[in-house]
């Protein structure tokens, strides 16, 4: 691609993700495991969010679930581009960690 003239370029990465459910603070984690979201077991929180989704959103979530990690937690508002997106790789039914 060739651009000419006064061009303002802003790189953006999109994974086609959108927010579902409410936002939670990670309240307990160990290395790459999230044990608690908002003071409750992470898996239970995600199951609650999943059960509140529309049928269409559930179908999408069944294909892949991603977690958005805020890049700068000191901001007052978060918009697209303010999150680092990561795939949810699995869950531990015994401990409730994801």
Image (cartoon, rainbow, N blue to C red):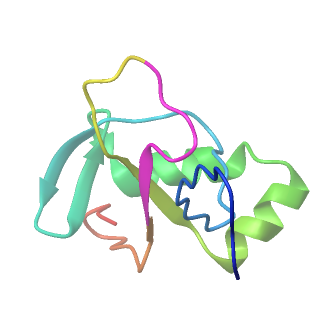
Judged left or right of residue 55, residue 52 is left
Q: Is residue 94 above or below residue 30?
A: below
Judged left or right of residue 84, residue 64 is right
Q: State the residue at coordinates (88%, 57%).
A: 55
The residue most toward the top is 76
Q: Position of residue 27 (x, y in %)?
A: 20, 39
Q: Quadrant of the N terminus?
A: bottom right
Q: Position of residue 29 (x, y in %)?
A: 15, 54
* Residue 36 is inside the magenta segment: no
Judged left or right of residue 82, residue 38 is left
The residue most toward the left is 30
Is 23 or 17 nearer to us in this picture? Answer: 17
Q: Position of residue 25 (x, y in %)?
A: 31, 35
Q: State the residue at coordinates (33%, 23%).
A: 75
Is 15 or 96 nearer to us in this picture? Answer: 15
Q: Is residue 2 above or below residue 4?
A: below
Please report the bounds of the magenta region as a residue range.
77-85
Q: State the residue at coordinates (41%, 57%).
A: 43
């Amino acid at each position: 691609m060739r651009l000419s003239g006064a061009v303002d370029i802003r790189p953006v990465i999109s994974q086609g993700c959108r927010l579902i459910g409410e936002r939670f603070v990670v309240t307990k984690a160990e290395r790459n495991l999230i044990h608690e979201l908002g003071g409750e077991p992470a898996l239970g929180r995600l199951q609650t969010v999943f059960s509140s989704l529309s049928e269409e959103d559930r179908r999408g979530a069944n294909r892949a679930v991603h977690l958005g990690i805020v890049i700068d937690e000191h901001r007052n508002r978060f918009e697209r581009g303010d999150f680092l997106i990561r795939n949810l790789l699995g869950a531990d039914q015994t401990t409730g960690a994801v």
